[in-house]
Amino acid sequence: MKASVLLKSSLLTSLFVVSSCATTKYSEDISKNNYSNLEAGKIYVVTMRDGSPKQKILFRNVMGDNLVGTAGKKDSTEVIIPKAKVAAVKDRSKARILAGATVIGAAGVAALVISSSRAD
């Protein structure tokens, strides 16, 4: 009984974590990529194809073949990233929600496991 509850709860937690992915990946063919799901005024972390460091950007708009934004809410330095260099874009707010949900889910799983072990 103990193993089955632990197995079920860990399976549900892992399914929740996998289904809550907050990263949008883009293909090498720029014409197939849809950047319309990026929202102006949100902070994104952009992963580059060439392996250069990730860039944090406060997204403004898409201008031609470039993503345009600023370096942050307080830093007004303009950042222009060519679409051809973008491998993935991660929404920081969704990542924070995912981290919080994972912690809450882990606490719930631990509570289930502890209560089921005491019930025997």
Image: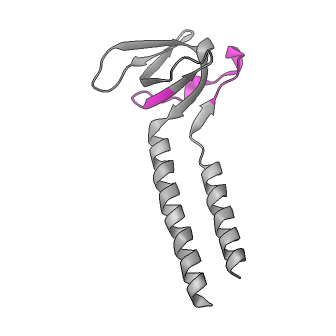
Q: Residue furthest left?
A: 74
Left or right of 40, for residue 65:
right
Tell me the residue at 42%/31% (across/down).
42
- Name the residue at 45% across, 45% down: 96
Measured as percent of width and height from the top left, residue 20 is found at 59, 48
User: In the picture, residue 23 is in which quadrant?
Assistant: top right
Q: Is residue 111 above or below residue 85?
A: below
Camera-side residue of 9 and 25: 9
The residue closer to the viewer here, 15 or 119, is: 119
Residue 114 in the image: x percent, y percent?
Answer: 55, 78
Foreground: 1 or 67? Answer: 1
* Colour pattern of the rendering: one colour
Residue 41: say if magenta. Answer: yes
Quarter of the rendering occupied by the C terminus? bottom right
Q: Is residue 54 magenta?
A: no
- The picture quadrant where one finds residue 82 is top right
Q: Locate residue 98 relative to residue 10 in the image: left or right.
A: left
In the image shown, does 32 or 18 lie closer to the viewer?
18
4 over 23 or under it: above or below: below
Quarter of the figure with the N terminus: bottom right
Q: Which residue in the rendered view is the most extreme toward the bottom? A: 120
Q: For the point 42% across and 14% down, which residue is it?
A: 79
Q: Which residues are magenta?
A: 25-45
Name the spot of residue 26 as percent of width and height, x first.
Answer: 66, 25
